[in-house]
Image: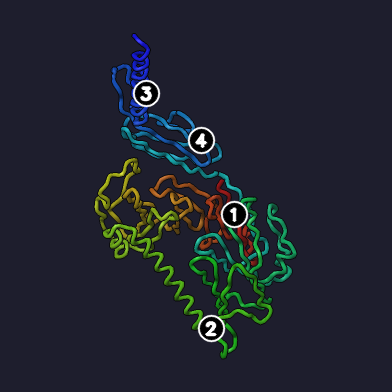
Amino acid sequence: MNRAHKRNLITFASLVIILSATFIIGIFIRGYRPDFSNKKLRATGLLSATSTPRGAQVWINNKLKTATDQSLSLSPGQYQIKIKKPGFSIWQKEITIEKEVVANANAYLFPVAPDLKALTFTGLVNPHLSPDGTKLIYFLPYKPTSQSLSPTPQSTPSPTPKQREKIGFWLIDLSEKQLGHSFQPRILVETKKDFDFQKTTLQWSPDSKKILINIPQNTQADNEKYFLIDLNQSYDFTTPPFLSKSYSEAEKILNEWQQEEKTAKNQLMNRLVTQLKEILLNQCQNITFSPDEKKVLYQAKEDISLPEKFLDEKIIGASTQKENRSLKKDYWYVYDRKEDKNFLVLSPEENSQISWFPTSRHLLLVNQKKIDIIEYDGHNCTTLYSGPFEEEFVFPFPSGKQLLILTSLNNNQEQLPNLYSVSLK
């Protein structure tokens, strides 16, 4: 055999090896595994298990198999999956494994004993969260010296003299900072001690950059005053205000903001298939989209049935959790418009306020006794906080790492409540 024939033979053999390896890798990725007892390839599926925080245990049918951020080959069928980490809630679901399909177990674990940290120390009234959830404005009224000297919890530092002296509107930025996140309040508008905050109303702009403040006046000639506040500036109401709006100007601004909100909502609704859009608008209420705009939370106004499917194409790797397409009056549901799945999340008997969590995979449930979180498909309900708090004021931080609550921990009825963060990491 001459040199040319040897070179051709080596090239052909290399090509065969490469193609064979590619074929073997391909069928391995698709989930096929050798079954030596039956002398054939066995079709399997893959379970991809991840967790936040990372490094949790993955239990399958009550047997420890691996850690999160790993994939496992499993024969087609149903499996009880549990993901555990010491100090955190347990995540569990029954997941169906299909051949040649990757099933995802994305566990978000919450601490069983979250930390509580005070963000304000002087008491406050009328907190208003911005539409995007990144800013909070509240009013710090004038208080007698006795309240300023009220005892505070041992874990709560005493208020600084600056915090005690500044009377007016305060602002907290709840966004994460690159160099830490102290979330220190800053004075936005300073007012006189006798400012009537109880009759004052606030309205955020849809972009969360401006606030319209309505201040009723005591004289009949000047019944109301409106102030348009830009959050990038500072104002002083202890002197005659230089920035004010008449009723007609304020009404025009409010109408513009309402139109912006309506336009934004219509744009989201128009992304839905026409049939679903008509059902939501005509037979449902309290419609809100998830932060990533891929899911819809809504409450049924009557007993209705959704079509078996809205989308024609089959979604590979979609959720295998049980759907609820027969809707009951006053029950809450979540529709996943990406996977064309509809899930029951809350019954009216539970009597809880419900809202989206920043992950877009969870919902907050708030009642008088505790704050729970539940996945969008109705599974893994976990208690985040149990204790005293103002039921009307519970919000997640934009990062999802903390909850913002308003409470008075010493149960002193005469003392104004303060803002606290509940750590979820």
Residue placed at 29% from the left, 55% from the top? 327
- Which element carries disc 2, helix, strand or loop? loop
In the image, 187: left or right of 45? right
- Foreground mark, 1 or 2, reads 2
User: Badge 1 is on which residue?
Assistant: 421
Q: Which residue is mark 2?
A: 246
Q: Nearer the viewer, mark 3 or mark 1?
A: 3
> How many neighbours does mark 2 have within 10 angstroms: few (below 14), some (14-19), or many (20 or more)?
few
Instruction: Please tell me which residue is depicted at 44% across the width and 51% down the height of the picture.
Output: 360
Instruction: Specify the amino acid type for callout 3.
Output: Ile
Q: Secondary structure at mark 4?
A: loop
**Sequence-earlier tag: 3 or 2:** 3
N-terminal label among 1 and 4 = 4
Labels 1 & 2 near each other (Cβ < 8 A)? no
Q: Is residue 147 above or below residue 239?
A: above
> Crowdedness of circle 4 by 10 Å Cα count: few (<14), some, many (20+)?
many
Q: Earlier in the sequence, mark 4 or mark 2?
A: 4
Q: Is residue 241 above or below residue 284?
A: below
In this view, the residue in front, 337 or 200, is 337
* C-alpha distance separating marks 1 and 4: 25 Å
Point out the frontmost of discs 4 and 2.
Answer: 2
Q: Are marks 4 and 2 in contact (CB under 8 Å)?
A: no
360 displayed left or right of 117: left
Q: Quadrant of residue 148?
A: bottom right
Q: Amino acid at mark 2?
A: Ser
Image coordinates of residue 218 in percent, x first then y, are 60, 86
Give residue 103's position: percent from left, percent from top: 37, 37
Q: Which mark is residue 56?
A: 4
For mark 1, give the secondary structure.
Answer: strand
